[in-house]
Amino acid sequence: MGAVSRQDPAKARQHKLPEPKPITEHGPARIIAMCNQKGGVGKTTSTINLGAALTEYGRRVLLIDLDPQGALSVGLGIPAQNMDRTIYNALMERKTTLRDVRVPTDIPGLDLVPSNIDLSAAEVQLVSEVAREQTLLRVLADVRDEYDYILIDCQPSLGLLTVNALTAAQGVIIPLECEFFSLRGVALLVDTIDKVKERLNPSLEISGILATMYDSRTVHCREVFSRVVEAFDDTVFQTVIQRTVRFPETTVAGQPITTWAPTSSGAAAYRDLAKEVLAL
């Protein structure tokens, strides 16, 4: 075992991040899709906490729950299962806009467009629509000027809803669990991103790959992280999200970690990620 595998490769890449500059006006929003077709990689956790951290730097943020499971809504304590109007209505009904379905969260400057199981029908219904991949882009145009960032929490698949998110977005953040099977899935996702860029959205770029559930104590984790950096180099954020019990607690509390445990290492990590995203 060489010295490299004993050292923490994530720590070796870290340097001080610039403090974000304050802003005087809002919009038009930069749209970022949080995307990975593998479930359980910290995608929803990262969407909530990056959004909340961005508001701490004075940015107005809209979170879009584009997963029929509605985990993003649950994670913010919004009872979306009982709601009559969700993202589904904004996508499928001409008369319903995002303004009609968005709700404020407990975090000032952070709004949510909730989702529930109704959205699973949209995938089927969109197939027969004209310009079906551009539906979300069209819906977002209404509110884009009111926000600085719009973060879309995609479902864990590469279906039509995810393609809609990629068509609407300028950037993609790929949360990646530090284990070997995750690496294999990223190639497929990058391939999908390339196709969307080529055919539907020439301005789409990968904003960054975010290492999640990182545990520097295991050789496996460190090796996978090193491989990710080898493959994607500067596209990998220097911020890594460590494995911690705090994240499941925040889901139960229906709050971001930045307010639930503001002094925790998890909260600090998402503030660092926000700095990196603001510097892009």
Image: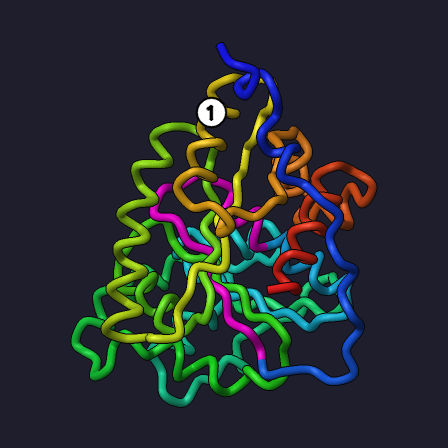
Q: Residue at x 69, y 62 (%)?
A: 54
Residue 134, above or below 217: below
Q: Residue at x 58, y 25 (%)?
A: 215
Q: Give left or right: position of 7 versus 20.
A: left
Asked if the stretch drawn in magenta spans residue 153, the answer is: no
Q: Nearer the viewer, residue 34 or 3?
A: 3
Corner quadrant of residue 172: bottom left
Q: Give left or right: position of 166 versus 63.
A: left
Q: Give left or right: position of 258 versus 190.
A: right
The residue singled out by tag 1 in the image is 223
Q: Is residue 90 visible?
A: yes
Residue numbers of the magenta segment = 29-47
How many numbered marks have been drawn onto this rendered protein structure?
1
Q: Is residue 115 visible?
A: no
- The image position of residue 22, as x and y in percent, is 80, 73
Q: Residue at x 43, y 38 (%)?
A: 230
The quarter in which the C terminus is drawn is: bottom right
- The image position of residue 69, as x and y in percent, is 42, 51
Kind of residue at badge 1: Glu
SS at badge 1:
helix
Asked if the stretch drawn in magenta spans residue 38, the answer is: yes
Q: Residue furthest left?
A: 128
Residue 252, above or below 190: above
